[in-house]
């Protein structure tokens, strides 16, 4: 067990930990911060599509005819 601890001390030096923290911070800034700042309440742009898919599945099942789809579109628009 001591060998593993000594080897981990060699690998996880302060320089490596600093580089790892820098990479994590850059990843957060580049990819994740936008979604956290602009979609705080959980409203993602694709949530509307999921909602409509759930409604259509509940009303018409797993298959829908073109007539049923056009009836749904005119009903929801008006």
Image (cartoon, helix red, strand yellow):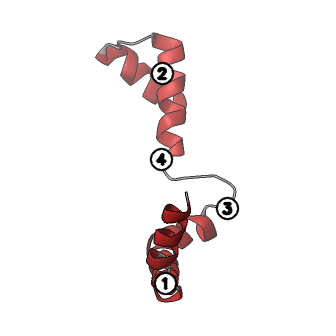
| Foreground tag (3 vs 4) | 3
What residue is shown with label 2? 56
Q: Residue 74 appears at what percent x and percent y?
A: 46, 28
* Secondary element at tag 2: helix
Picture mark count: 4
| Foreground tag (3 vs 1) | 1
First in sequence: mark 3 vs mark 1: 1
Give the label on residue 73, or none.
Answer: none
Distance of mark 2 from mark 3, alpha carbons? 27 Å
* Residue located 55% across and 57% down the image: 1
Along the line of sight, the residue nearer the viewer: 53 or 67: 53
Crowding near the residue tagged with mark 1, few <14, some 14–19, many ≥20 C-alpha atoms within 10 Å: few
What residue is shown with label 3? 40
Give the label on residue 46, or none.
Answer: 4
Q: Residue 45 appears at what percent x and percent y?
A: 50, 53
Crowding near the residue tagged with mark 2, few <14, some 14–19, many ≥20 C-alpha atoms within 10 Å: some
| Foreground tag (2 vs 4) | 4
* Residue located 37% across and 23% down the image: 70
First in sequence: mark 1 vs mark 4: 1
* Residue located 51% across and 71% down the image: 6
Q: Residue 54 appears at what percent x and percent y?
A: 52, 25
* Secondary element at tag 1: helix
Q: Residue furthest bottom?
A: 15
Distance of mark 3 from mark 4, alpha carbons? 15 Å
Is 57 rendered above or below residue 1?
A: above
Visible residue check, residue 77: no
Distance of mark 1 from mark 4, alpha carbons? 31 Å
Distance of mark 3 from mark 1, alpha carbons? 25 Å
What residue is shown with label 1? 22
Q: Residue furthest left?
A: 66
């Amino acid at each position: 067990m001591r060998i593993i601890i000594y080897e981990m001390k060699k690998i996880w030096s302060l320089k490596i930990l600093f580089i790892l923290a820098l990479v994590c911070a850059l990843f957060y800034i580049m990819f994740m911060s936008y979604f956290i700042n602009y979609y705080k309440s959980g409203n993602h742009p694709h949530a509307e599509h999921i909602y409509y898919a759930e409604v259509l599945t509940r009303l018409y099942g797993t298959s829908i005819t073109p007539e049923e789809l056009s009836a749904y579109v005119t009903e929801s628009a008006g």
